[in-house]
Image: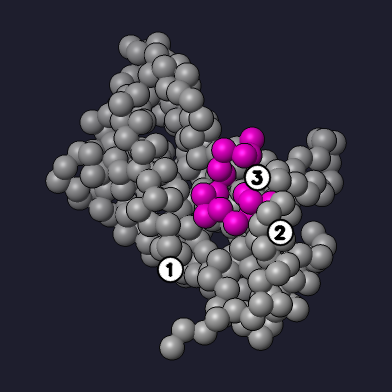
């Protein structure tokens, strides 16, 4: 028998949903933010070229993007594809599995789709977790591909999109919305997706300024999560290149021969 959420708990969340619809979206880095999945991939493809001297062909870039975006359609309720419900370990295992599938896929299109799904997981991790709150000084890549390392970081978490685990803890879940930046660095057992996510500047956390020492002007947590996502996505692609990913290498064109035409063409793609 399915248990129903108490009405008193639904009221505040319905109210928040009316004013902050983006906060409920599983589509991290959605169109309402300055960073979205397409922009992150555009920047990652450019950084890949700078690092390797090769461009990924525009048609391959598009296949990767489609795989990324379809994660929100085909696997909307799969928590491991979005690093939700505090299942970071499962998220990492899914990423490793997709990496293997992309390497062994018989059909080229399936390989590119798996790469796209993998990049979606990487990007969602930074939008849905408290990783960036814990790394305000400089961009630090999370060891998602080796999730057992995250087991030694019990303060790192993602929020619950499925609210059933927090039934009878409604007050604590709502109080999470009032926690400070410093408090969100610590594990909050009843943190919901809406409390943690940084999908856009319009979410509760995404619009908060990043507090760090230094001469640089503060940026918003959504932007800081986006920059982490770009760095990690780029690293994922560069690592695949250096490990002789056979399907990805079929997509590569030397920059000195292409004159960066593929990146320039893909940069024109609407976001």
Q: Is residue 128 left or right of residue 69?
A: right
Which of the two marks, 3 or 1, is nearer to us in this view? 3
Q: Which of the 4 quarters of the picture holds residue 178?
A: bottom right
Q: Residues within 10 Å of mark 1 (few under 14, many from 20)?
A: some
Q: Which residues are magenta?
A: 20-34
Q: Residues within 10 Å of mark 2 (few under 14, many from 20)?
A: some
Q: Quick one: label 1 or label 2, which is nearer the N terminus? A: 2
What's the residue at 57%, 73% (across, down)?
163
Which residue does the numbered mark 1 point to in the structure image? Answer: 90
Name the element at disc 3: loop
Q: Quick one: label 2 or label 3, which is nearer the N terminus? A: 2
Q: Residues within 10 Å of mark 3 (few under 14, many from 20)?
A: many
Q: Which mark is residue 16?
A: 2
- Quadrant occupied by the N terminus: bottom left
Residue 174 higher or lower than 22, as above or below: below
Residues at discs 3 and 1 in contact (Cβ within 8 Å): no
Q: Which of the 4 quarters of the picture holds residue 90?
A: bottom left
Here the colouring is one colour
Q: CA distance from mark 1 to mark 2?
A: 29 Å
Residue 37 higher or lower than 196, as above or below: above
Name the element at disc 2: helix
Q: Is residue 112 left or right of residue 130?
A: left
Q: CA distance from mark 2 to mark 3?
A: 15 Å
Q: Which mark is residue 200?
A: 3
């Amino acid at each position: 028998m399915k248990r129903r959420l108490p009405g008193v708990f639904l009221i505040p969340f319905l109210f928040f949903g009316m004013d902050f619809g983006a906060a409920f979206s599983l589509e991290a880095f959605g169109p309402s933010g300055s960073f979205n999945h397409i922009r992150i991939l555009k920047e990652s493809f450019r950084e890949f070229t700078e690092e390797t001297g090769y461009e990924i062909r525009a048609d391959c870039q598009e296949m990767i993007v489609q795989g990324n975006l379809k994660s929100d359609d085909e696997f909307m309720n799969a928590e491991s594809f979005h690093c939700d419900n505090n299942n970071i370990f499962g998220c990492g295992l899914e990423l490793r599995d997709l990496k293997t599938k992309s390497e062994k896929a018989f059909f080229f299109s399936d390989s590119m789709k798996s790469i796209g799904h993998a990049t979606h997981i990487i990007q969602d991790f930074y939008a849905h977790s408290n990783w960036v709150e814990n790394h305000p000084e400089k961009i630090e890549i999370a060891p998602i591909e080796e999730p057992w390392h995250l087991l030694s970081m019990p303060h790192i978490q993602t929020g619950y999109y499925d609210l059933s685990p927090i039934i009878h803890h409604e007050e604590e879940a709502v109080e999470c919305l009032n926690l400070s930046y410093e408090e969100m660095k610590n594990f909050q057992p009843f943190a919901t997706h809406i409390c943690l996510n940084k999908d856009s500047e319009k979410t509760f956390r995404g619009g908060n300024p990043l507090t760090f020492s230094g001469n640089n002007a503060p940026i918003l947590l959504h932007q800081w999560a986006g920059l982490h996502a770009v760095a990690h996505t780029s690293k994922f692609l560069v690592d695949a290149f250096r490990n002789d990913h056979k399907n990805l290498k079929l997509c590569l064109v030397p920059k000195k021969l292409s004159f960066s035409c593929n990146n320039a063409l893909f940069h024109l793609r609407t976001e």
